[in-house]
């Protein structure tokens, strides 16, 4: 871990050549040594002298839309803000490196972070519409260049892209890039998920994996491309697009989901913590549908009916234990 800390700390505190920056960038967002990186970042956060002024803290805690930076943004400044609001630092560094490599030193960027338990709709400079799911971060410039339209996403979002034959629209995630001219598609790329998924509702999209940039995958309507970060494998399947987009209507559908995935989805939607304290659910997969008015207690009640010996305990308004 000392070696990893040295690498990260050196990058944050020194000017580095462009080639070194790119090499660090690809290593930093890869899944290798993930636990060690997390520990190092936690240590660095504690060492950062973050200027936690009320203006910055309040702006970020309110689902940021409209925070503009008219000067060059430093990694240290981003790290400080990340420490304040607990946004995964690697996600923000990823977006910063991308923006700095595609725009001038005089940056003007927008960040939209959606807290757990909420969703948000925003419009991009080209009038494209983005519906962001809870716990998601979108970074984009206040104006697109004449050649392309690029945004960075960590989390999940439904994009309705304004058609522009002269400028490609690109969604950049830690695992893959999605390129379109004008279409409607969903990208699910949460940092703590095992998979990154792209689902096409209308039009066509082209996908390029970071680890295989020379290859491209073309999606047709109602197809979903899935990339497993852990196993380094991908697949394309026909799906019910409406089921994938059910989150945009504030509803929940579990379609043969492992209980671990169900827990993560529930935590994001209801802004709670759920602790699984038993191994008896290791092979438990859940299929169920819930209306938009369903409470967390209502979901637990249904799970108790369909899962043998299911038990849970409410520790507080935001903490639950499954035993």
Image (tube, grey):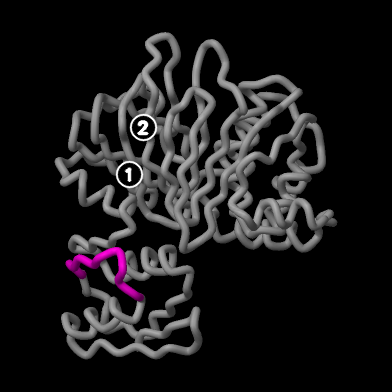
Find the magenta span and give its range. 286-295
Say if 263 sits above or below 170 in the image: below
Q: Tell me whether the residue at label 1 lies in contact with that at label 2, contact meaning CB atoms closer than 8 angstroms.
A: no
Which secondary structure, mark 1? strand
Q: Is residue 3 visible?
A: no
Which secondary structure, mark 2? strand
Left or right of residue 242, residue 196 in this image: right
- Residue 112 percent location from the top left of the image: 57, 44
Toward which corner of the image does residue 247 lie, by quadrant?
A: bottom left
Q: CA distance from mark 1 to mark 2?
A: 17 Å
Q: Which quarter of the rendered picture does the N terminus lie within?
A: bottom right
Read off the residue under disc 2.
160
Observer-nearest residue: 229 or 54?
Answer: 54
Question: At 67% from the left edge and 27% from the top edge, which residue is drawn?
Answer: 100
- Residue 208 percent location from the top left of the image: 37, 28
Question: At 65% from the left edge and 32% from the top edge, which residue is drawn?
Answer: 109
Read off the residue under disc 1.
197
* Magenta-colored stretch includes residue 32: no
Q: Which quarter of the rendered picture does the C terminus lie within?
A: bottom left
Left or right of residue 222, residue 39 in this image: right
């Amino acid at each position: 871990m000392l070696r990893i800390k040295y690498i990260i700390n050196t990058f944050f505190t020194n000017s580095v050549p462009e080639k070194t920056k790119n090499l660090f960038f690809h290593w930093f967002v890869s899944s290798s040594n993930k636990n060690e990186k997390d520990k190092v970042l936690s240590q660095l956060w504690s060492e950062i002298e973050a200027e936690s002024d009320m203006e910055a803290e309040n702006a970020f805690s309110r689902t940021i839309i409209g925070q503009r930076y008219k000067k060059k943004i430093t990694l240290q400044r981003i790290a400080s803000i990340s420490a304040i609001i607990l946004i995964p630092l690697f996600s923000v560094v990823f977006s910063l490196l991308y923006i700095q490599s595609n725009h001038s030193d005089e940056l003007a960027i927008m960040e939209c972070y959606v807290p757990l338990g909420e969703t948000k709709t925003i419009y991009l400079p080209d009038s494209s519409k983005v519906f962001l799911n809870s716990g998601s971060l979108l970074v984009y410039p206040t104006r697109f260049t004449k050649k392309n339209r690029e945004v960075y996403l960590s989390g999940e979002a439904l994009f309705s892209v304004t058609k522009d034959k002269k400028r490609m629209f690109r969604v950049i995630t830690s695992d893959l890039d999605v390129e379109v001219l004008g279409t409607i598609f969903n990208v699910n790329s949460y940092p703590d998920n095992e998979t990154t998924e792209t689902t096409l509702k209308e039009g066509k999209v082209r996908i390029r994996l970071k680890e295989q940039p020379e290859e491209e995958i073309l999606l047709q309507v109602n197809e979903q491309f899935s990339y497993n970060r852990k196993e380094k494998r991908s697949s394309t399947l026909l799906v019910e697009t409406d089921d994938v987009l059910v989150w945009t209507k504030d509803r929940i559908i579990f379609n043969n989901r492992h209980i671990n995935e169900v827990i993560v989805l529930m935590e994001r939607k209801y802004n709670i913590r759920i602790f699984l304290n038993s191994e008896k659910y290791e092979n438990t997969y859940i299929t169920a549908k819930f209306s938009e008015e369903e409470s967390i207690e209502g979901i637990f009640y249904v799970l108790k009916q369909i899962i043998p010996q299911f038990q849970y305990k409410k520790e507080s308004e935001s903490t639950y234990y499954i035993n």
